[in-house]
Image (tube, rainbow, N blue to C red):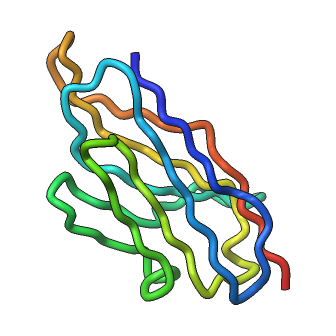
Amino acid sequence: QVQLVESGGGLAQAGGSRRLSCRASGRILSIDNMEWYRQAPGKQRELVATITSGGSANYADSVKGRFTISRDNAKKEVYLQMSSLKPEDTAVYYCKSDVRRPDIFGLYTYWGQGTQVTVSS
């Protein structure tokens, strides 16, 4: 099995910063894309940022220029550095990884349990 565990959530003030981390563990041969999603109360889950295994990143327009996604392939971790935070960034943040396992053929998607980020004005 594969587990994703996020950390780094909490309270932040508008204009402040927060760094989220997500560690993958378990039966992992390699990880393709790693992504951060978020879901605010009453809203659908939305894609925030994507990073490929080679390090290419893409961002939602709402966070472009404020958030930075990065990864450490050796540690099987993905990070989301959030700056210039706004109250509308308040949400549960989830990491998602597309994993290749050594025991079964194919690419499998795994999700973390989520970490709450609350931005006060």
What number of labels is visible? 0
Residue 22 vertical placement versus 38 (above, below): above
Asked whether 29 or 60 is in front, the reply is: 29
* Residue at x 23% of width, y 21% of height: 101
Q: In the orientation shown, which residue stands out farthest toward the top?
A: 103
* Residue at left offset 47%, top offset 27%: 3
Location of the N terminus by quadrant is top left
The picture places residue 75, in percent across and down from the top left corner, at: 33, 42
**x 38%, y 21%: residue:** 26
Say whether residue 94 is left or right of residue 15. left
Quadrant of the image occupied by residue 57:
bottom left
| Residue at the extreme right | 121
Residue 84 place in picture, x, y as percent: 61, 87
Residue at horizontal 38%, vertical 74%?
59
45 with respect to 101 (left or right):
right
The front one of 83 and 95 is 83
**Residue 118 higher or lower than 112, as above or below:** below
- Which quadrant of the rendered structure holds the C terminus? bottom right
Q: Is residue 16 above or below residue 26?
A: below
Residue lying at the far front in this picture: please name it.
74
Left-right relation of 32 to 70: left
Task: Residue 117 in the image: state x and y as whole percent.
Answer: 71, 62
- Left of 21 or right of it: where is 102? left
Q: Position of residue 80 (x, y in %)?
A: 48, 64
